[in-house]
Image (tube, rainbow, N blue to C red):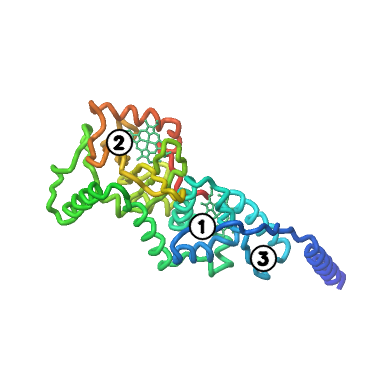
Amino acid sequence: MKKRKTFRDILAALLVIFIALQFVRPSIPQQPVTSDIQAPPEVKAILRRACYDCHSNETKLRWFDQISPASWRVAEHIKSGRAVLNFSEWDKIAAPDRAGKLWESVNQAIAGAMPLKDYETIHREAHITEKDLIILKDYLNATVKDHPGDTAKQNAAKQQYQNWIDGKMNSAQLPKTLNGITYMPDYKNWQAISTTDRFDNGTMRVIFGNDIAVKAVHDGKINPWPDGTIFAKVAWDQLENKDGNVTTGAFKQIEYMIKDSRKYADTHGWGFARFKTPQLIPYGKTATFTSECVGCHKPVADRDFVFTSPLKN
Ligand code: HEC
Ligand code: HEC
């Protein structure tokens, strides 16, 4: 009997605490919407649905978000989410950085890093569906393949690519570096796993990963990266039109890293290659050009010489 009473007392105490907690709800600051992202309506609709609770001033809290102590976690997410990226204060981001931020955002959604998983579990409507993925990838592809002011070169590259698909071009016709790595046009079908939002020297960079890389990310087996992993880092000039919108300009260069721990044992298991200009001129006067690559990638030796961290979790 005594035991029962203690149990009831504990329950009652917990209930009192729970009710008391409801009075110490964190406040989520109301901030005005001063601007908004510019993206095609179908892309925007996805971001609105999946991201705006944490990355805008248009947060829509559901009743279950407002119950303490869960509400504290929600408030924390909103606070830090808005701090790194706020779609409602888009005008506060420097014009040249906006395109990069949007790029990064879409990539985060495609890579499955955003929205935050625990949020997604209880907000099913924020889930990025297969259909959403197609829309987001199409959007990225259109941005990547759009090289204004460079139509002739772009068409030439497209033709080269089409020839490659049609098998009209044998590998001997594709450029090759002195360490024996052939240009791989196929990167265009890989997944963009990261963009660098640094617009220092006026270039825009996108890093693509092949299926093995993407699977390794998915399985969390990225240190070391498995043999067969290939990264392509592509850089374009960055063009800004009179409205301050940034688009990709001329193709500058493409760099590859191919993982084969035996073949490329001399360079820490990675084969390095770089092709410059739209003519894809192989970089390096001698095969030892790779020591330049290795040297600069050395600071991330503990991450298997790879800078990019595709998932921020
Ligand atoms: C539940 C809240 C929440 C939702 C929903 C959410 N995010 Fe985030 N996001 C965060 C938080 C918190 C951070 C910062 C901490 C971190 O990186 O984990 C962040 C970081 C980011 C960053 C990195 C920004 C930078 O400059 O470092 C990007 C990009 C991003 N989110 C995009 C998105 C996109 C796109 C969506 C929708 C598909 C989304 N987020 C949905 C909370 C959220
Ligand atoms: C001056 C330093 C430097 C040199 C030299 C350099 N890299 Fe990198 N590389 C970087 C940085 C930094 C990144 C991370 C992405 C970014 O910031 O652009 C990177 C990223 C990459 C990536 C994407 C995978 C990753 O690690 O994130 C590839 C592929 C790559 N580099 C290939 C090469 C090749 C091939 C060479 C030599 C021809 C080379 N790099 C030389 C600094 C360098």
Residue in the image at 42% along x and 51% along y: 217
Give residue 70's quadrant in the image.
Answer: bottom right
Q: Secondary structure at mark 2?
A: strand
Q: Which label belongs to residue 65?
A: 3
Estimate the spatial distance between the alpha carbons at disc 1 and disc 2, rounded to whole Å.
37 Å
Instruction: Classify residue 285 as left or right of residue 205.
Output: left
Q: Secondary structure at mark 3?
A: helix
Is the CB of mark 2 within 8 Å of ligand 2? yes
Which three-letter amino acid code belongs to the residue tagged 3?
Answer: Asp
Q: Is residue 233 visible?
A: no
The nearer-to-camera label among 1 and 3 is: 1
Q: Position of residue 56 (x, y in %)?
A: 59, 58
Residue assigned mark 1: 37
Q: Position of residue 157 (x, y in %)?
A: 22, 48
Residue in the image at 59% along x and 54% along y: 89
Residue in the image at 50% along x and 47% along y: 95
Is the CB of mark 1 within 8 Å of ligand 1? no
